[in-house]
Image (spheres, rainbow, N blue to C red):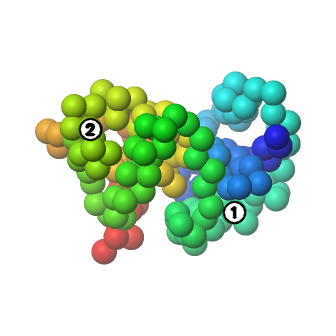
Amino acid sequence: MIIEYGINMTPFGSALIAKSEKGITDLQFTDNSILAEAKLLSRWQNTHLIRKDKAFVELNNKIFFEHKSYPEIELDLIGTEFQVKVWEALLTIPLGKLSTYGDIAEKVSNNNALRAVGSAVGKNPVQYLVPCHRIIKRDGTIGEYAAGVKLKKAILAFEKTRGK
């Protein structure tokens, strides 16, 4: 299997975007391209990785500057059956709106799976496109984000202005 990737600037700093022949497999924000590449390599062991920063500029622009989203951009979501169900449920959260772990558990027909939902949300390999940043705690607090709470707040503020 071949995974191509590029690291480019977004409104939120640098991001690594990787794709297979089926679609985007990974999107992670990063302050350190070496660590981002190491994370990608650990996820895709025994896969041929090819870095093509310039080839990914157009895709990066579609996502972050033209604001295209799923389903306009093909995703190749690879995880357990439960994780994929959770990620698909996240895709139903409208731009500018928020949801809770409980809401997602209900959408995947497992109201008692809050911890499992939280774990699946945290393992989302396609940050931003699969909008795990739109998940908040039941009490209304922001909660964690793989790329940091500060970035989560920035993305939510950015989307709030676009969702009107």
8 sits left or right of 147 in the view: right
Q: Separation of disc 1 and disc 2 at Cα? A: 35 Å
From where the camera sits, is residue 141 visible? no
Residue at coordinates 43% horizontally, 45% vertically from top-left? 85
Instruction: Using the rendered view, name the quadrant where residue 82 is placed.
Output: top left
- Helix, strand, or loop for circle 2? loop
Determine whether 163 is above or below 11 in the image.
below
Which of discs 1 and 2 lies nearer the camera? The answer is 2
From where the camera sits, is residue 51 visible? yes
Report the label total: 2
Determine whether 135 is above or below 10 in the image.
above
Residue at coordinates 57% horizontally, 70% vertically from top-left? 72
Tag 1 and tag 2, C-beta contact below 8 Å: no
Residue located beneath label 2 in the image: 110
Determine whether 69 is above or below 147 in the image.
below
User: Measured from the top left, where is residue 103 in percent x and y?
Assistant: 23, 47
Q: Residue furthest bottom?
A: 164
126 sits left or right of 103 in the view: right
User: Measured from the top left, where is residue 53 in percent x and y?
Assistant: 80, 51
Lower position in the chain sequence, tag 1 or tag 2:
1
User: Looking at the image, which is closer to me, 164 or 99?
Assistant: 99
Residue located beneath label 1 in the image: 59
Determine whether 90 is above or below 161 in the image.
above
